[in-house]
Amino acid sequence: MTRMSARGGSLTMALVAILLIGVAGMGRSAHAQGARPPLTAATRVAIDRLVDSLSAERLPGDVIRDKVAEGVLKGADDARILAAVRSLASRLREGRQLLGASAADDELKAAASALFVGVEREAIARLVDTQRKRGAASLTMPLTVVAELTLRNVPADLAVSSVESLLRRGARDGELNSFRNTFELDLQQGRSPREAVNAGVRSTLNALGRSPD
Amino acid sequence: MPDDNEPLPAALTAVVAELRREVPLRDAWHEQLQRELAAADRSAADGSAADLADRRVADAARVRGTRAWRITPVSALAAALVCMVAGAMLGDLARAPVSPERERPPATLATLPAAAAAAAAEPAGPMAVRFAVMAPGVQRVSVVGDFNGWDADATPLTLASDGRTWTTLLPLAAGRHTYAFVIDGQIVRDPIAPADAEEDFGVPNSVLLVSSRK
């Protein structure tokens, strides 16, 4: 094979890979529902009560309204929307218990996502403890990364321990982001979620100039 | 280096001859042009050769119905300096809410490190985030999320010159945002951004973290 044709082959493979990534990402889709009937009065009242209740508890009620709007766009019926916002409200309350009174709204939202995918309360509490010991660092990114890893079939305990280990070695949001990107790349290259997360930890620790446990 | 005295090739000579051939003008135009040039020559008798040349250019321009400007090297340099300073000031003004890092497409967690680095030095406020998605051959793309009430009509994307990439720049408050694209009515998550774990309605969203500038 000549150098030119080898280069052309690499280019073609890269283009195919980009297309496949795009197609895979777009594989799951839904129609935006322009003609969905409006929420019933009863549903609206129930949502208003829920928002008022959360606001009284100093929890972010606007998150509920966002979830309703998302459900309407995605064509969900009233019952499904109500179930989703009640579940979200419950997880926001749980997040408040785990993260404490000083937790920011974004931290609560990230905690709610982690709880949604099945991360255990104890594991989140451990992560909170690790991060709080570092001072004023936010939990939004660590919890978001944990939730995403778990969503991508990394066992929840491994996801939490990996992020914890990075935090203990001084990783900040930027390093957690690199870790997440490395994980994503490894998945695309065919590694299993467990292998990809371990490789991501090693790579991030190397970049931090630290060695794994 | 070619020799100026070297004879041109025959083909090139023919081309040069053709280019030098006088273009026929209507007699009235030709006479008017000659009169104006002669007048310019007379009035330039007291002036320098440079002034004469400038006047000729100006006269010729008047014949064509346009205006000529004389720019000396010094004034050109001064004008360039003024333009550079003004451009820099306007650039700063236009970019006030937008840092280059935050413009980097696509708008995902990848924007975080630089934005976080800028956090200490910059005032609080919304940040311009560029959303981009490759979607060739489609008619309409928009972005929906908690920042626009999940309204599919609120934030349309514009097709870039490559004919495949759709983009928009959106000011967003610092924080955690969830979003998706609507491509010809289909809701799809950003394939290269982290997925939001919550899939209440069957299609996952993507997560975008915008760092605070406080």
Image (tube, rainbow, N blue to C red):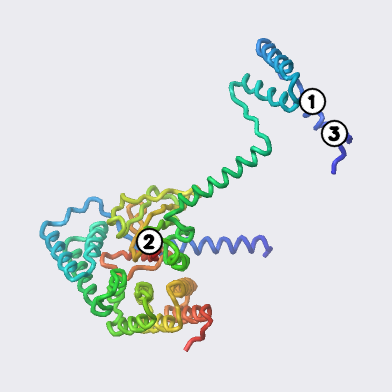
Which image quadrant is residue B122 in? bottom left
Most foreground residue, B75 or A81: B75
Q: Position of residue A107 (x, y in %)?
A: 31, 72
Which image quadrant is residue B9 in? top right
Establish if A194 lies above or below A50: below
Establish if B41 lies above or below A183: above
Which label's residue is closer to the chain start, 3 or 1?
3
Q: Badge 1 is on which residue?
A: B17
Residue B144 in view (yes/no): yes
Q: Which mark is residue B124?
A: 2
Mark 3 touching mark 1, by CB under 8 A?
no
Whether residue A107 sits left or right of residue A90 in the image: it is right
Establish if B80 lies above or below A164: above
Q: Residues within 10 Å of mark 2 (few under 14, many from 20)?
A: some
Whether residue A151 sits left or right of residue B33 in the image: it is left
Establish if A157 lies above or below A105: below
Most foreground residue, B39 or B165: B39
Q: Residues within 10 Å of mark 1 (few under 14, many from 20)?
A: few
Q: Which mark is residue B187?
A: none
Q: Position of residue A111 (x, y in %)?
A: 29, 74
Residue A152 in view (yes/no): no
Q: Which chain does the numbered disc 2 sit on? A: B
Which label's residue is closer to the chain start, 1 or 2?
1
Query: Helix, strand, or loop for circle 3?
Result: loop
Q: Badge 3 is on which residue?
A: B8
Cα separation, mark 1 vs mark 2, equals: 69 Å
Which label's residue is closer to the chain start, 3 or 2?
3
Q: Which chain does the numbered disc 1 sit on? A: B
Residue drawn at point x = 63 percent, y = 62 percent:
A7
